[in-house]
Image (cartoon, rainbow, N blue to C red):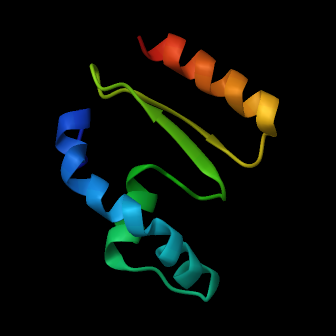
Amino acid sequence: MVPRTIHSLLPLARPLADLKGETRKRERGFNGDETQLLQNLYRANAFPTLIVVSARTGMMTRVQGFLGADETVAWIRESVRALR
């Protein structure tokens, strides 16, 4: 079952703190179970993958790949507006 609201995603937030180390493992060819779950849940198939999630609705937007500083800020602002 895939969580549908931000509240149901909170238990998954703890592993996010260790994703840097897990990303290094991925570069060496393997993932931990928690990282693989998060990658599957958010369809994070590229690096970087940026995700903005609405705390109110649980809806999310996602972009994959490097955008550059100005484009990233613009994407975040538009995502926040779209998810309100």
Left or right of residue 72, residue 8 in this image: left
Q: For this rendering, which residue is in front, 45 or 16?
A: 16
Q: Residue at x 55, y 21 (%)?
A: 79
- Of the 4 image quadrants, the one containing the C terminus is top left
- Depicted 32 relative to depicted 72: above or below: below
Q: Residue at x 30, y 26 (%)?
A: 55
Q: Position of residue 28 (x, y in %)?
A: 61, 89
Q: How many marks are shown on the rendered structure?
A: 0
Quadrant in the rendering for residue 14? bottom left
Q: Position of residue 56 (x, y in %)?
A: 27, 19
Left or right of residue 1, residue 72 in this image: right
Q: Residue at x 51, y 39 (%)?
A: 51
Q: Position of residue 75 (x, y in %)?
A: 67, 26
Left or right of residue 19, residue 73 in this image: right
Q: Residue at x 18, y 42 (%)?
A: 8
- Depicted 81 relative to depicted 63: above or below: above
Quadrant in the rendering for residue 32? bottom left
- Depicted 51 relative to depicted 43: above or below: above
- Depicted 54 relative to depicted 45: above or below: above
